[in-house]
Image: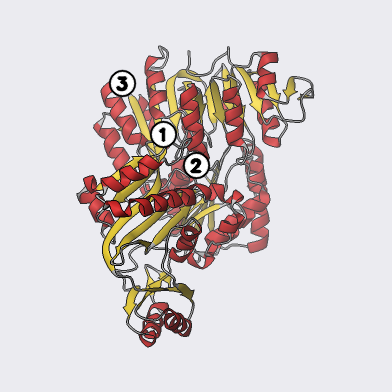
Amino acid sequence: MSILVDKSTRLLVQGITGNEGLFHTQQMLSYGTKVVAGTRPGKGGEWVLDGKVPVFDSCKAAIEATGANASIIFVAAAFAPDAIFEAADAGIPFIVCITEGVAVQDMMRVREYLDQKQVRLLGPNCPGLLTPGEAKVGIIPGDIAIPGNIGVVSRSGTLTYEVLYALKLVGMGATTCVGIGGDPINGTNFIDCLSMFEDDPHTEKVVLIGEIGGTDEEKAAQFIASKMTKPVVSFIAGQTAPPGKRMGHAGAIIEGGAGTAADKVKALEAAGVKVAKHPEQIPDLLK
Amino acid sequence: MKLHEYQSKQIFSRYGIPIPKGRVATSATEARQIAEELGGRVVVKSQVLVGGRGKAGGIRLAKTAKEAEEVATQILGMEIKGLSVRKVLVDPAANIEQEIYLGITNDRAARRPVFMASAAGGVEIEEVARTNPEKIIKVHIDPLLGLRDYQARDIAIGIDLPKEYWKQFGDICRGLWRAYMESDATLAEINPLVILKEKSLLALDGKMLLDDNALFRHPDLAEMRDVDEEAPAETEARKYGLTFIKLDGNIGCMVNGAGLAMTTMDIVKLFGGEPANFLDIGGGAGADKVAAAMRIILSDKNVKVILFNVFGGITRCDEVAKGILAALKEVKPTISMVVRLVGTNAEEGRKLLADANMITAETLVDAARKSVAAAKA
């Protein structure tokens, strides 16, 4: 069992002919993900990866021909908002946007529109998600995680890999690992994922990887305290980050004294969450 | 990206917001000329990208042009919170009856822009926000609809603005909204917006923060960046698409991914070391980017150790290793280096670095311990 993606996921890749689109489509196919179509306006009718995946001019055409029920976006930041709108309008219920650097005002409009249409977005600026052994929708290296009973949700990319790898080294595996992305305005958030993990019968424990900026970890802590029965272990990156500086991720910035790691750790600990001092401590705290 | 007060007010002015008729000077003589042209009392205001200029003595009143020159001489030699003042704005002094706060920012939690206003504007607004948050009116804006007229009226009513100013205030709200939207700002703020004794409104001070991710569609605004005000290494890093933030320690960190870069700093500190920087080489960094990153780290003379922590995903460890080798040939550093490569092509990367005389580490903890030990050696 898993959340969001599994063997029934029929994936559409938006921006399939670009370098990253092609490379990761190949990786996803090798992992066993059903990539049924790709889009690239102007290249409809072509095939990529030795004739494995058909390319369409639009999401609408791709869905009509292949019955795609999820999409992943690899287009450049300037065009990513349009790609999200297009997928939503074509009827895709679950969209994953890998693209980094999408303008925040664009994302506010995207979120407003998607909420009205009840379309779920993951990202932008995220590594996507991985249900070990079943499906990989995104760029998380497939070989660093094994199937298991731990749900993982994270705002970061490579830090998530670090945690999955630390779990694998001690034989622990994941039901699903979801990277929600490091932007200030995104689609799926911590609470959405915690709630899905709580409902997923195969997930027994959850790892939440947060970072400085915003108040999502504090809200997650409230949710954990009031709604969750499963144990949660956490790590918060950015203990040493100076205020006022954007630490790489657009969302990772301590503003007006709010969003510090110390506040988040405090809120999580008050909710009964064990907080690791560094990622390699996480497996011990899960035991 | 932060804009100066004078730049923010110029943008506001394009959207019909009334601003003082002042100009920017880079020398005291120029400040005097501007004061002469304006006539009467002027305010000389340092243009630096930090808050608290007034309290630091960087904003001063001058009764005459001669006094403006004297005041400008003092301010132009000042350092405010570590930044030297290179420009002053000379504005005519205003006859203030009341100071209002008016601003728009992105409300992350609500995922919408929010207008904020208070009848108690001026330098103490942050204090008001802390102690009397109810005195700050908040109106969220639907990003698909934009600011509606009734919302501007709600703000005016919310701050008890006398009716005679509603129309002008509405125009200012609409102007500020357009300035915020069309510049892709993350903050557009007028503080204070003043009611003059002459019974009209004037934006005395302005502040704008722009979304770096949206600058691609605003080349005119991107040119306004004041590179004098950032650390040279940060400017250099941006050229190569690297994110670099200088810190005060002696362990240089080169990492792929922002979350992991922060974690690497944290773990160095946890094991008793002090990170010299935050540096994210990003996803898929090739050899040239890695070499640039290494030069930037080494330009900080405090650095005694470099810790390379790379978890390959999109980024290939062998590419990073090639970058390290290229940089080593070029800069020939004499300091210790600790390297940890995991993930995509890690084995190939390690082989490439086998003869490079670097300390290798298996885990994060191992890497942090070895770096801290090397820094103390």
Disc 3/disc 1 C-alpha distance (Å): 17 Å
Q: Which residue is mark 1?
A: A209
Within 10 angstroms of label 1, few (less than 14), some, or many (20 or more) residues?
many
Residue at numbered disc 3: A228
Query: Which residue occupies 42% across, 30% down?
Result: A189
Tell which subunit mark 1 falls on: A
Q: Residue furthest front?
A: B164
Name the residue nearer the viewer: B299 or A280: B299
Label 2 residue SS: helix
Crowdedness near tag 2: few (<14), some (14–19) or many (≥20) residues, C-alpha within 10 Å: many
Q: Are marks 2 and 3 on the same chain?
A: yes
Chain at tag 2: A
In the figure, residue B43 lies in which quadrant?
bottom left
Please tell me which residue lies in front, B276 or A220: A220
Residue at 53% x, 59% y: name it. Answer: B234
**Picture layout, residue B90 above or below residue A193:** below
Which residue occupies 56% across, 57% down? Answer: B221
Q: Are marks 2 and 3 in contact (CB under 8 Å)?
A: no
Depth check: A176 or B351 in front?
Answer: A176
Position of B160 with respect to A5 (left or right) is: left
Looking at the picture, which amino acid does disc 1 mark?
Ile
